[in-house]
Image (cartoon, helix red, strand yellow):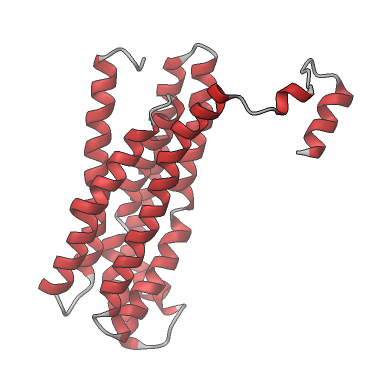
């Protein structure tokens, strides 16, 4: 921040900075809280959901718990591309909306979805063939490798749908409707993701594949809600 201010002041970039600019303004602070609070709550509840899923896996035994833990680490790495689109769409979309170009914000959303879906499809197909060697990098336990392979082969498809709803979340934040991102995430977690993982863990005690698919079902639910919300906003002429 200090370096940025120094450059702005020395380079005379046409941006004036005074003490008044550092004083909190009720209107601006209110807007920041209105947009930021739903995202903060959403991120916190998502972490709680992952903890619950971990608890469910732990109750299945040591091998299952180890397999789920390994796969979660792999997935978190692969999700760097889809999750980065939330920030990218939010920033680029907000810039275009501020410039009076809402149609560009929508195109940014479409491009982001195209990139994430393409990435998700490619990675999902590759993982189907290399799941065992990838999981085997983290453990030599044959039972854990088998269970981890089952889990990641189901879970990996989440890369496709997560990329879509991450992109929509970024767009909703860009237009100042971050509560929509909160709603679709929490709805999917409470109604589909956590209950689905719990039920599949009970109904399929010998495999983790259905548990992986339950997570995908949660993201698919988010995508459906996002599409409905986007369609409603479009009918209300709030998107280009």
Quadrant location of the C terminus in the rendered image: top left
Where residue 194 sits: x, y (%)?
A: 23, 60
Where residue 146 sits: x, y (%)?
A: 29, 80
**148 left or right, relative to 101:** left
Q: Quadrant of residue 70?
A: bottom left
Please give the name of the residue rendered at 26% of the width and 43% of the height, measured from the top-left corner.
Answer: 222
Depth check: give the residue in front, 29 or 106. Answer: 29
Depth check: give the residue in front, 125 or 155. Answer: 155
**89 left or right, relative to 196:** right
22 versus 77 height, above or below? above
Depth check: give the residue in front, 160 or 20. Answer: 20
Please give the name of the residue rendered at 78% of the width and 25% of the height, measured from the top-left corner.
Answer: 19
Quadrant location of the N terminus in the rendered image: top right
82 versus 32 height, above or below? below
134 versus 3 height, above or below? below
Please give the name of the residue rendered at 55% of the width and 14% of the height, measured from the top-left corner.
Answer: 99
Where residue 122 sits: x, y (%)?
A: 37, 51
User: Number of numbered discs present?
Assistant: 0
Where residue 100 sits: x, y (%)?
A: 50, 11
Please give the name of the residue rendered at 44% of the width and 60% of the height, measured from the top-left corner.
Answer: 76
Quick one: which residue is furthest to the left in this view?
A: 203
Quick one: which residue is furthest to the right in this view?
A: 10
């Amino acid at each position: 921040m200090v370096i940025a201010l120094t450059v702005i002041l020395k380079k005379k970039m046409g941006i004036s900075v005074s003490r008044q600019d550092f004083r909190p303004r009720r209107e601006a602070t209110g807007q920041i809280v209105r947009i930021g609070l739903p995202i903060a709550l959403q991120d916190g509840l998502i972490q709680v959901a992952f903890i619950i899923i971990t608890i469910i896996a732990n109750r299945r035994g040591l091998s299952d718990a180890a397999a789920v833990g390994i796969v979660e680490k792999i997935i978190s790495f692969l999700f760097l591309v889809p999750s980065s689109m939330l920030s990218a769409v939010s920033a680029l979309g907000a810039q275009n909306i501020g410039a009076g170009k809402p149609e560009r914000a929508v195109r940014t959303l479409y491009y982001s979805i195209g990139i994430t879906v393409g990435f998700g499809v490619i990675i999902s197909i590759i993982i189907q063939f290399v799941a065992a060697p990838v999981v085997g990098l983290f453990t030599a336990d044959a039972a854990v490798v088998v269970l981890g392979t089952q889990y990641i082969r189901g879970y990996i498809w989440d890369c496709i749908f997560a990329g879509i709803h991450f992109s929509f979340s970024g767009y909703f934040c860009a237009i100042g409707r971050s509560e929509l991102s909160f709603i679709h995430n929490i709805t999917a977690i409470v109604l589909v993701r956590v209950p689905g993982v719990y039920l599949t863990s009970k109904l399929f005690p010998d495999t983790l594949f259905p548990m992986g698919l339950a997570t995908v079902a949660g993201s698919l639910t988010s995508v459906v809600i996002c599409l409905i919300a986007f369609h409603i906003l479009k009918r209300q002429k709030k998107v280009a």
